[in-house]
Amino acid sequence: MVPSGALDEPILHDRSRLARLAERGFFAAAAAAWLLTVLRGAGAAESWAAGAAALAIALGLFAVFASPAGRVWLDGPRLVLAGAGLLALGSVYLAVGGDGYEYYSLLRSPVLDGDLDFVNDFAGLGSRPVHSSRGEVTSRVAMGVSLFWAPHFLLAHLLALAGLDRADGFGPLYQAAVTAASYVYAFAALLIIEALLRRRASRAVALVVVLAIWLATPLHFYMTANPSMSHGVSVFAATAMIWLWLRLREGTEPRSWALVGLAGGLTALVRPQDAVLLAIPALDLVLRPGPARRALVGLLVPPALLGIAQLLLWFAMYGPGFTTVVREQNLVAGTSPHVMDFLFAARHGMLTWTPLYALAIAGWAAWAARERLVPGLFATAFTLAVLVNSTTADWWGSDSFGQRRMLALTPLFALGLAEIVEWFRRRPLVPIAAGLALLVLWNLQFEYVYNAGLVAGKSQAVDLDRLLSAQVDVAHRRLVRWHGRIPAGVWVLAHDNLNGAWIDEGTRSLGGVVDLGREPEDLPLVVGHGWYDPEDDGAVSYRLSKGWRSWLRVPVRTATPARLGIRARRGTAALPVRMRVEVNGATAGEADLSVDWTELAFAVPGDAVRRGLNDVALVFSATPRRDIAGYHGKDAAAAVDLLRWERAP
């Protein structure tokens, strides 16, 4: 008799083989999604990249369900993370802007022009040139980002030479290549962090923490909305250094520590302020017992060589006086630290804009209860980073979403956050995940508030009371868009808590009136499609209708029969118009418009009224452009002053 295990073995082998093939297909489709995203700069449809991403996710699902446990790298939590990354790839802004012009010029000029004359680079990018403190057109940044972008830029150049774009280094294909590269580098850092966390915690904790550190911090913004800044690359370089250090720190082989030093040197080349992270491996060697001098030399030689290369570049750009030029143009001369402002100010304060970081710091403290050295090194690097970045003249980071200059510490924050989550593991993970999800929602809405300038300019302070009001307002606007997609009772409760303004009752009743000339501040989005901007006619504020149908959205808390009054007149005196009123598609009546202001009454049956937003459509029998020969003015059939809503007795 054949043992059952012997029969199962071939089946498991076949399943493993299929799973590995599906996993390879996943990686190939994911790479295709990235390439097709780059090719959007050459005119490829956005749907192509989305289709490749969908194919990758489908192949990943097959690999996960077909594979016996542990037979492939891609498992359920990793597929969730990778799938989220593929879906977010379509939201990457693919044009260079801001500081990205300087990183890009420092790459393009030596590669394609063979010089360091940046005048034509800024002109080709359509950007105002940046001048040094001595007046010459320059790029003030270090060369690290340009080094990381170089392979992607060269790939774009090859594609341009093949006829997909103009091969001058300025076209959208080139810009898409480097911005998408920043996204990929940053997402690779998230995958490395996830792997680090799996060694310290469960797969579920690793997934939750990585999603939070991505979506509830400024990292998401600088991966998608502004990827031509240095931060996506800096997160990758710093994460690589921390990963190498944690893997190799038990040994003293100089060549191993040289790898750590190389990653740290590249981190410093991307953003010189981030050189403070080298204090982590350096102090680790200095403080450990026993001889570690050779390992310390191995650690420090690569950063020293990379630093010399950067100094030589600056010498080539500025000549013998380069140190003065670099110091003056990088805002580091004679400014005292603003530590408390840096951490807590309304103007991009690190902990006020990104409260998740406070949990991460608390995680270091929880970690220190059982092991002092590593969390102590993290705290030291954090302190140095705060001191360095709070000493710059623009400690708030200029047009910064949060304290972007601390993003290189992302792997340290992730490890701390995992510690605090583990500390709470005596309670279920779901409440912790829910709390982190709230921070994610806060951060994503904050991105919208910041980008839209709803509270203040991008370089200005954001008061917490105004920010909270803006957050509630943005949430309410989204709730309005969700009307009809979620249960009416849920929508009414959510509206009650987010806004509370109803036309008939509630904490902020509109008193039964909507003035179209002055849309109520307490209830935005009442005025729908088909209207011109408000106008004044003496003491009357009103809106002109636009086209043959105009819409209003009336918030009603209690669904009862109603009497609807509309104060209106003709939009063009010479054109007779009959107006029909529909409430949620049901006709409430018709009436002819007069030349003078007149309040017209309509009866709304109870079965036409619903709890929540009610669509009120004004349908006109004639419009000026359609019914008046040679008419070229506003296509206004009616002028409407107000809508009055009263419960029928």
Image (cartoon, grey):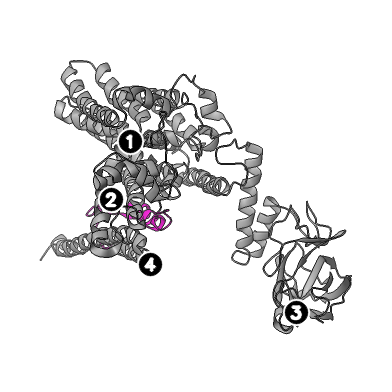
Image spot of residue 280 (x, y percent): 31, 25
Q: Which residue is mark 1?
A: 270
The span from disc 2 to disc 4 (Cα, nearest Å) is 21 Å
Q: Nearer the viewer, residue 423 or 150?
A: 150
Q: Residue at x 76, y 58 (%)?
A: 502
Q: Residue at x 26, y 64 (%)?
A: 163
Q: Which residue is mark 3?
A: 620
Question: Can residue 150 be seen from the camera position used here?
Answer: yes
Name the image quarter holding the N terminus: bottom left
| Amino acid residing under circle 2 | Phe
| 397 vs 328: above or below | below
Question: Can residue 369 be seen from the camera position used here?
Answer: no
Q: Which residue is mark 4?
A: 45
Q: Is residue 77 magenta?
A: yes
**Element type at marker 3?**
strand
Labels 1 and 4: the sequence-earlier one: 4
Image spot of residue 274 (x, y percent): 36, 30
| 28 vs 200: above or below | below
Say the numbered circle drawn on residue 153. Answer: 2
Between marks 2 and 3 in the image, the one whose residue lies nearer the viewer: 2
| Amino acid residing under circle 4 | Ala
| Residue 224 relative to residue 185: left or right | right
**Element type at marker 1?**
helix
Image spot of residue 55 (x, y percent): 32, 66
**Badges 4 and 3: C-beta atoms under 8 Å apart?**
no
Labels 4 and 3: the sequence-earlier one: 4
Tell me where the magenta segment starts and ends, as one range. 66-94
Query: Which of the 4 image quarters holds residue 457?
Result: top right
Callout 2: few (<14), some (14-19), or many (20+) C-alpha neighbours within 10 Å?
many
Q: Nearer the viewer, residue 129 or 309?
A: 129
